[in-house]
Image (cartoon, grey):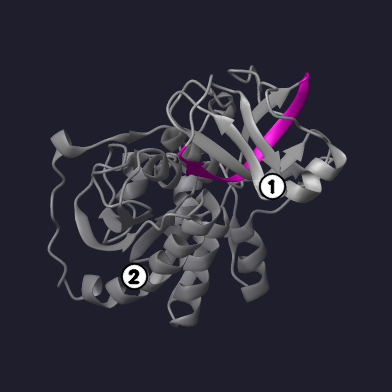
């Protein structure tokens, strides 16, 4: 099929690679404008732009899709379909109608379970047993369109936001390649979503990364996994910021935030119910370290107390 592809981060780049590898004619690639990054704040291309240029594809980076000139550029591509994956800009209704088959979205949840910007992290935070990819016909709403295809995967007990992202990116790439031939032949019945079953996956706010030790160990452990690698679950002790990268629940009790044990196997911290053994930590300005290495350079002792609620992420 002749396609317009719209996407920005690595999640979308996996789908672009699969579509290109399957031989689809990608007439135009839409992606977000280059953004400043790193300490020098140099402008850097998105993962999708970098890959599109490697393939020799035309790249278009409008700041908005609302003006007539931009829409004319899209219309001139002569595409049959627009494929969207984590693009980051709202597609107005006139843009959705520019191609014969409209626009479809590769969404990282089993719709309507998590509509919105952060379905991967929200699924982990909620303790969902499974998630998946939905291929959705886009309409004017936020992830409200009919579902054309979906495939589920389990969420493993040790899945992080990063590991689950990678699994879903690969699944999305496989599923979109499988779906397009069926869509072109009209063999994909659209299943309307049930709004009553929908949940909203709000964009992750960095302030959410602060750990409140009065919460249950189960809830905090989910936060540690969901926010790995970004923005990282955070706490503090002695006015030193900490990030917690790996932890597991253990059977222990104490005043929330109190260190119950501190040894090479981990730092056990009491929570509102239960306790967490912190197995990988990072102090502000330092490196991510296993507990034994961390404690060798930053001693923590039984009875010390972490701040009950981190005021701000580090």
When asked about the image quadrant of residue 50, the answer is bottom right
Majority secondary structure in the magenta region: strand
> Mark 1 or mark 2, which has the lower sequence index?
1
Seen in the picture, residue 221 relative to 59 is either above or below; the reply is above
Q: Nearer the viewer, residue 79 or 132?
A: 132
Q: For residue 23: magenta?
A: no
Q: Nearer the viewer, residue 111 or 242?
A: 242
- Disc 2 packing (10 Å; few <14; some 14–19; many ≥20): many
Seen in the picture, residue 306 relative to 144 is either above or below; the reply is above
User: What residue is shown at x 61% (from left), y 23% (from top)?
Assistant: 258
The magenta stretch spans which residues? 238-251
Label 1 element class: loop
Q: Position of residue 30 (x, y in %)?
A: 53, 55
Q: Which mark is residue 175?
A: 2
According to the picture, the residue beneath numbered tag 1 turns out to be 34
Q: Nearer the viewer, mark 1 or mark 2?
A: 2
Question: Relative to 164, is 192 on the left or the right?
Answer: left
Q: Position of residue 217 (x, y in %)?
A: 46, 34
């Amino acid at each position: 099929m002749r396609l317009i592809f719209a996407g920005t981060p690595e999640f979308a780049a996996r789908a672009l690679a699969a579509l290109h590898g399957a031989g689809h004619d990608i007439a135009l690639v839409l992606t977000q404008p280059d953004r400043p990054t790193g300490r020098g704040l140099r402008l850097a291309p998105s993962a999708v732009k970098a890959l599109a240029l490697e393939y020799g594809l035309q790249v278009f980076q409008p700041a908005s899709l609302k003006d007539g000139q931009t829409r004319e550029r899209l219309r001139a591509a002569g595409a049959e379909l627009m494929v969207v994956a984590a693009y980051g800009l709202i597609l107005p209704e006139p843009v959705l109608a520019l191609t014969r088959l409209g626009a479809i979205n590769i969404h990282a949840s089993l719709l309507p379970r998590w509509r919105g910007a952060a379905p991967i992290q929200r699924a982990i935070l909620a303790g969902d047993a499974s998630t998946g990819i939905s291929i959705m016909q886009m309409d004017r709403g936020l992830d409200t369109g009919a579902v054309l295809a979906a495939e589920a995967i389990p969420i493993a007990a040790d899945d992080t936001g990063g590991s689950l992202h990678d699994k879903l990116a690969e699944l999305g790439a496989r599923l979109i390649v499988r779906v397009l031939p069926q869509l072109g032949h009209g063999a994909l019945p659209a299943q309307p979503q049930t709004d009553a079953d929908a949940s909203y996956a709000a964009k992750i706010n960095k302030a959410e990364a602060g750990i409140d030790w009065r919460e249950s160990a189960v809830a905090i452990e989910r936060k540690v996994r969901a926010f790995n690698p970004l923005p990282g679950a955070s706490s503090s002790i002695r006015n030193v910021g900490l990030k917690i990268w790996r932890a597991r629940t253990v059977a222990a009790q104490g005043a929330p935030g109190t260190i119950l044990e501190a040894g090479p196997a981990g730092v056990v911290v009491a929570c509102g119910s239960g306790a967490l053994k912190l197995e990988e930590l990072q102090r502000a300005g330092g490196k991510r370290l296993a507990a034994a290495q961390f404690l060798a350079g930053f001693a923590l002792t039984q009875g010390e107390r972490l701040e009950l609620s981190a005021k701000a992420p580090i």
